[in-house]
Amino acid sequence: MHRRLLLCVMTAALAGGAGCAAREPGEPLKPGFNMFSKEQDIQLGRELSRQIPQQYPVVRNEFLQDYVDRIGRRLAQQPGAENYPYTFTVLNQEEINAFALPGGPLYVNKGLIEAADNEAQLAGVLAHEMAHVALRHGTSQASKANLVQLPAALAAGVIDGGVAGQLAQLGIGLGAQSVLLKYSRDAEREADALGARIMASAGYNPIESARFFEKLEAQGGARAPEFLSSHPSPGNRVRLVEAEIRYIPSGRYGYSTGQFQQAKNTARSIQGVQAD
Ligand SMILES: [Zn+2]
């Protein structure tokens, strides 16, 4: 413990006071260093979410939307989700992926719904994304990028009412390698841990999320699912989640809407990109 503390102090000194991100199972999960306010996270997410339908095909299916909303709202009510204004959108893409924008907009590809074995696995991915939002990983990473112009850009965003435009001028946007969307292994470890807590308190067995990630990793190789490139494995995912679960008050994990199979069939039946 002392040795780790000393390492943290040294790391913090070398990194200019960014602090120590490493965390042991069961320890509290809190957002790290951040130059954005919570309100700016929410504003940025709202602004960026307007660009999404221009870049990705959105599934417009009432049943599927309602299904994902029901799971998402249940997760959003749990303590670790921190009451952000979450929204849930299914994208008409086969790649196994999901992502979240700062402040609450969550996106899940229909291909991920098809790849999940049960509702708890889908809920686990949503809870993992929610954890990235609640722990403010995207804007924390942008803050740590040492952009000297960032404080001025954020202040200007307050005046002209647009954060996304100011950040775009600094090269921070929605690209595949965006600092807002591609997380460090430490951030993944935290999102796995908080996601497990959120899904457990919603009544889903948290081990299912670890099982799903393992299944995706097993597919590996050149065809590694998209999810793993934007959410790199922290290593020993199952072991880490199992370690975290020991600190979660044991509950009943029998919750399900009972409509997973219908949702999976619906996702399968949706072909190609639908015209808007
Ligand atoms: Zn992640």
Image (cartoon, helix red, strand yellow):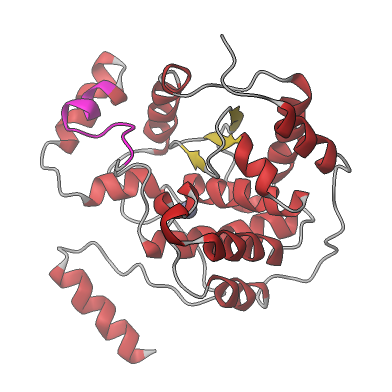
Q: Is residue 148 above or below residue 269?
A: below
Residue 76 shows in this picture: no
Quarter of the image with the C terminus is top right
Residue 251 lies left or right of residue 4; in this view the side is right
Q: Please, which residue is most extreme toward the left here?
A: 148
Residue 150 placed where, x, y %? Answer: 18, 37
Residue 39 placed where, x, y %? Answer: 42, 32
In percent of the image, x 52 and y 21: which residue is there? 57
In percent of the image, x 23 and y 77: which residue is there? 9
Residue 193 lies left or right of residue 101; in this view the side is right
In percent of the image, x 37 and y 32: which residue is there? 40
Which residues make up the magenta segment? 165-176
Residue 243 placed where, x, y %? Answer: 60, 78
Q: Nearer the viewer, residue 163 or 118?
A: 118
Q: Is residue 25 above or below residue 172?
A: below
**Number of on-image labels:** 0
In percent of the image, x 24 and y 61: which residue is there? 18
Residue 245 shows in this picture: yes
